[in-house]
Image (spheres, rainbow, N blue to C red):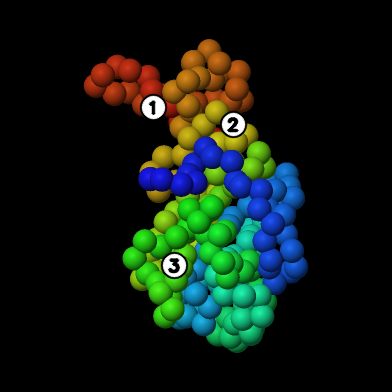
């Protein structure tokens, strides 16, 4: 896939937002951050997504994660739209900034352009892209959904928990993993190293191959 993807550095752009001008690297700071785009203001699915992000803000705060929304319309339009978002979502406040991109330069640089959708003037618009950026300003994970499919914010939190855990320990999280469940020890860690690294110990699953790569622990 051409354009910004996992492992790449987040371009250090200056963006206009509902909270004023923001420098992306300064905004990320030493935290994880989620940058998520929406096709357009005053559209139904986007209104549910922005509201869900507001409703999940406490969970992101608890994890020390910053949020930044983006839609191409201008800041004044975003401010009007936020009133609808808050009303539709039972008054839950949108406390995170939403970036504007009337020239479409930001969505090009952040690889958020929807290849199929255009606005009524024929201009490009963003897909439902979402980048999780690490404190090192690198893209750790990207979702790319079409305009027709709203995202699952539980999956965003779940993936974030996995990324944060994997940034602290040499582990990975298995299929459908949720916070609190066992994790697997990275294949790059030897059993001797694992004994020292994981004070809770670990269990190795016996397999027909007799290879000892399925090692579960709790961190
Ligand atoms: C929506 O948010 O509902 C939407 C936006 C653009 C195209 C289709 C749906």
Q: Is residue 181 left or right of residue 84?
A: left
Q: Position of residue 46 (x, y in %)?
A: 49, 74
Q: Secondary structure at mark 3?
A: strand
Q: Secondary structure at mark 1?
A: loop
Residue 169 bears which disc, if any?
2
Q: Position of residue 168 (x, y in %)?
A: 62, 34
Distance CA(mark 1)–CA(mark 2): 16 Å
Q: Is residue 11 left or right of residue 204?
A: right
Using the rendered image of the protein, determine whether residue 42 is visible from the camera's viewpoint: yes
N-terminal-most mark, 3 or 1: 3
The single residue placed furthest to the top in the displayed view is: 192
Residue 214 bears which disc, if any?
1
The residue at label 2 has a CB less than 8 Å from ligand 1: no
Assess whether mark 3 and mark 2 are in contact (beta carbons under 8 angstroms): no
Question: On the rendered image, what quadrant is the C terminus found in?
Answer: top right
Q: What residue is shown with label 3? A: 124
Residue at image point 57% right, 59% down: 106
Q: Position of residue 161 (x, y in %)?
A: 56, 47
Q: Between tags 3 and 1, which lies in front?
A: 3
Residue at image point 63% right, 84% down: 80
Residue at image point 56% right, 67% down: 103
Q: Between tags 2 and 3, which lies in front?
A: 3
Residue at image point 51% right, 32% down: 171
Distance CA(mark 3)–CA(mark 1): 46 Å
Using the rendered image of the protein, determine whether residue 203 is visible from the camera's viewpoint: no
> Which one is nearer the viewer's eye here, 101 or 211?
101
N-terminal-most mark, 2 or 3: 3
């Amino acid at each position: 896939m051409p354009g910004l993807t996992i492992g790449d550095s987040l371009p250090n752009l200056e963006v206009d937002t509902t909270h004023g001008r923001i420098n992306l690297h300064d905004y990320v700071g030493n935290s994880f951050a989620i940058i998520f785009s929406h096709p357009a203001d005053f559209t139904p699915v986007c209104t549910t997504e922005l509201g869900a992000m507001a409703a999940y803000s406490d969970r992101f705060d608890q994890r020390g994660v910053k949020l930044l929304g983006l839609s191409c319309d201008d800041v004044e339009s975003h401010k009007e739209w936020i009133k609808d978002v808050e009303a539709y979502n039972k008054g839950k406040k949108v406390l995170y900034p939403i970036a504007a991109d009337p020239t479409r330069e930001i969505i090009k640089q952040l690889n958020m352009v929807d290849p199929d959708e255009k606005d009524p003037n024929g201009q490009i618009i963003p897909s439902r892209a979402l980048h999780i950026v690490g404190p090192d300003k690198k893209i750790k994970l990207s979702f790319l959904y079409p305009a027709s499919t709203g995202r699952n914010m539980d999956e965003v939190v779940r993936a974030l928990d996995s990324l944060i855990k994997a940034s602290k320990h040499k582990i990975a999280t298995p299929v459908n993993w949720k916070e609190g469940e066992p994790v697997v020890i990275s294949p790059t860690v030897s059993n001797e190293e694992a004994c020292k690294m994981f004070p809770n110990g670990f269990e190795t699953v016996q397999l027909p191959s007799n290879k000892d790569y399925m090692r579960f622990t709790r961190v």
